Amino acid sequence: MDPAEPSPLKARPPLDLVVVSVEAAATGVISLELAAPGAAALPEWAPGAHIDLHLPSGLVRSYSLHGDPRERGAYHVAVLNAPDGRGGSAEVHRIAAPGVAVRASAPRNAFALEQASHYLFLAGGIGVTPLLAMAREVSRRGAKWTFVYGGRSRDHMAFLDALSALPGGELRVVPQDEAGLPDLAPAFAALPAGAAAYCCGPSGMLDAAVAIGEQTRPDIPVRLERFVAPPAPADLGEDQGFEVELARSGITVTVPPGVSVLDAVRAEIPGVMSSCEQGICSSCETAVLAGVPDHRDSVLTAKEHAANDYMMICVSRALTARLILDL
Ligand code: FES
């Protein structure tokens, strides 16, 4: 990467926000409007971006922005209360009320829209959130789009009205209790050359999108945003230990097999940021100054992996005996 070119994921200072309003968006889903005190303009973002919310318990959770990026006074996130989740979304539901202060990261975008002749959006459940912002943007530009939206039932599917109101595209709503799972093959088959697919939802849907895309339309890039990390490849082999030099802190830490860089660093520098700790959110993104990372995340693109400028220290390791990180 050109050093003058800022990373799209580069960390910016945290934001102190206030909950302005809380609305029910679907069964089990609330939508929060967040603003800076005094209604100051918030940092810019583009569709596909997310923010991390720092919850009172200490949990940090990432949520996609689903509002309109041209509205600089507020961010909108939607949170599904997942009873079998890791506790973050349940906490958001518990504390969300107008006037509640919440610290958030500035927006980061690991799921950005790229130029295409036609956009295929594949949403499953709460995965609709980044794709709603994308469809709004694409619709505003006058580009062509198809949106396939699956969910348990209509009352569990947020933002149906907002999607239905977008002009210029085709929306296919597929509630599972009425129509089963979305049939993705015809959606891929109908795409013109130069199209791109964006998919966010449960792992089964993402895996199906990748498999069907590869089988039927290998020319179409399929971009994913995951809720959970995909299974690790079977051929990773035994973890090796290595050393990490923290350039700004002047400390060197040893990362033994079975311990993440994040945990090893935290033993020396508590408070290093993380959220998913599965390599899917980019909260722990760290600049690499020397050495070669063994990238194991699902956030950076193949090109970004090859550049070795940044790594996700919650999951990625080292191919060299030593890494030097900008920490
Ligand atoms: S904490 Fe989410 S990618 Fe590392």
Image: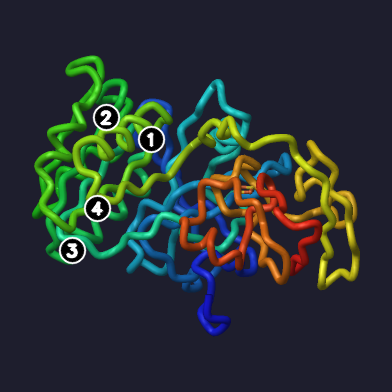
Q: Amino acid at mark 1?
A: Gly
Q: Looking at this view, is 9 or 90 the one in front?
A: 9
Q: Are marks 1 and 2 in contact (CB under 8 Å)?
A: yes
Label 4 SS: strand
Depicted 187 relative to depicted 198: above or below: above
Identify the residue shown where x is 61% and y is 40%: 278
Q: Is mark 4 within 8 Å of ligand 1?
A: no
The picture quadrant where one finds residue 104 is bottom right
Of the pair 300 and 23, the residue shown nearer to us: 300
Tag 1 residue: 201
Q: CA distance from mark 2 to mark 4?
A: 19 Å
Crowding at label 4, few (<14), some or many (≥20) Cα neighbours within 10 Å? many
x, y percent for residue 20: 48, 53
Q: Residues within 10 Å of mark 2 (few under 14, many from 20)?
A: many
Q: Which amino acid, mark 4?
A: Ala
Q: Which residue is mark 2?
A: 150
What whole-number distance in Å separates the C-alpha atoms at marks 1 and 2? 9 Å
Alpha carbon of mark 3 to alpha carbon of mark 1: how far?
A: 24 Å
Marks 2/4 in contact by CB < 8 Å: the verdict is no
User: Which one is earlier in the sequence, the residue at label 4 or at label 1?
Assistant: 4
Which disc is residue 196 wearing? 4
Mark number for residue 140? 3
- Considering the numbered disc 2 on the image, is that residue within a helix, a strand or a loop? strand
Give x and y (percent) for residue 100.
60, 49
Image location (x, y in percent) of residue 125: 35, 31
Q: Nearer the viewer, mark 3 or mark 2?
A: 2
Displayed quadrant of residue 237:
top right
